[in-house]
Image (spheres, grey):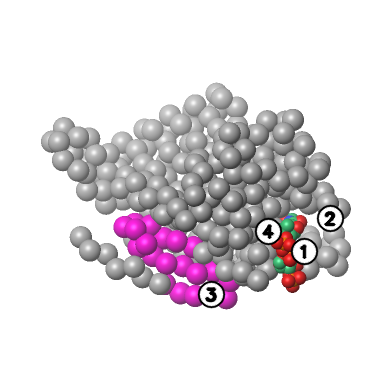
Amino acid sequence: MFIFTQKVNTMDFIKITKNKEPNVALIELSRPKDLNALNLQLMGELKDALRELDADDSVRVIVLTGNEKAFAAGADIKQMADKSAIDMLKIDQFSTWDQIRKTKKPLIAAVSGFALGGGCELAMTCDMIIASETAKFGQPEIKIGVMPGAGGTQRLTKALGKAKAMELVLTGRFISAEEAHNYGLVNKVVPVEMYLYEALNLAKEIGNMSPVATQLAKEAVNRSFETHLDEGLYFERKNFYLAFASEDQKEGMKAFIEKRKPDYRGK
Ligand code: DAK
């Protein structure tokens, strides 16, 4: 089957390309002059893009990237600087972040350069991270008088352990891609010219699986972060049974027995 790469639309700060690989959509953050600082408009566009792609049957896996210099250098400090607590409450950025977190399809971050503050949190909100050797991760909010607000204290601590997460959050220091990889924050580190290719390749591999099973499995893995083991196992069990209600399960097992490639339809 030949699939055309299709540029879907160009919003101001987000570019979406479908079928970069079969079943894979690519979202590129695009505010290069500001190191992809996450202003409200960019975050709104990202939320809409993810919601659209999540509902699109031609897409099974989504890759999120920036550019070589920056995945994203954090929330837009210039936009936040003069805001009061009540302004922040009214803007309610949390609903946008919650929506992103609820993306059902596997989401892979392809990170090069700076992934700082909200940028680091955005990468950690993704399910996996492929990093270039030049990637730098950090939560430098403390240096500008605040603290992480989109999950940094929680996700970084789960990934790095308390001592290292505390160091990064309280000093604002960055860690290299290699260090992030050693801690298990990052799946793989590759030379800068390879990071997007590697992420798309991983997405392509996952895109060959049953989309029903990948969504159920993603949900169950994520549940392990949100609950105790008993409840997590119970949740896993329910999704495991549910997978047997899909045609893809029948197709996958039949294809194995018949020694052929499965043809998954997402049903
Ligand atoms: N915001 C706005 N502009 C930024 C930016 C940012 N976070 N990061 C960089 N820029 C802009 C710079 O101002 C500069 O613009 P011009 O001056 O040229 O107009 C341009 O990008 C290039 O940056 P530099 O000249 O500084 O480039 P360098 O290579 O020298 O330095 C750097 C790169 C990444 C080390 C440096 O730019 C830097 O320290 N940037 C700030 C990093 C940072 O502190 N990030 C954390 C921001 S606070 C929330 C959810 C999340 C958050 C908050 C609320 N809710 C759900 C409520 C998150 C908060 C944050 O992320």
Q: Which residue is mark 2?
A: 144
Q: Given this view, does label 1 or label 3 mark the residue nearer the observer?
A: 1
The residue stretch that appears in magenta = 8-27
Which numbered dot is residue 77?
A: 1
State the separation of the CA atoms marked 1 and 2. 9 Å
Earlier along the polypeptide chain: callout 3 or callout 4?
A: 3
- Label 2 beta carbon less than 8 Å to ligand 1: yes
Residue 130 in the image: state x and y as whole percent.
50, 47
Earlier along the polypeptide chain: callout 1 or callout 2?
A: 1
In this rendering, the answer to whether 56 lies above or below 12 is: above
- Label 1 beta carbon less than 8 Å to ligand 1: yes
If the image is split into quadrants, where does the N terminus sit?
Answer: bottom left
Kind of residue sitting beneath label 1: Ile
Q: What residue lies at 55% left-to-right and 48% top-to-bottom?
A: 133
Kind of residue sitting beneath label 3: Met
State the separation of the CA atoms marked 2 and 4. 13 Å
Which numbered dot is residue 73?
A: 4
Q: Given this view, does label 3 or label 2 mark the residue nearer the observer?
A: 2
Earlier along the polypeptide chain: callout 3 or callout 2?
A: 3
State the separation of the CA atoms marked 1 and 4. 10 Å
State the separation of the CA atoms marked 3 and 4. 20 Å
Quarter of the rendered structure image containing ligand 1: bottom right
Secondary structure category for the residue under label 3: loop
Residues marked 3 and 4 touching at CB (< 8 Å): no
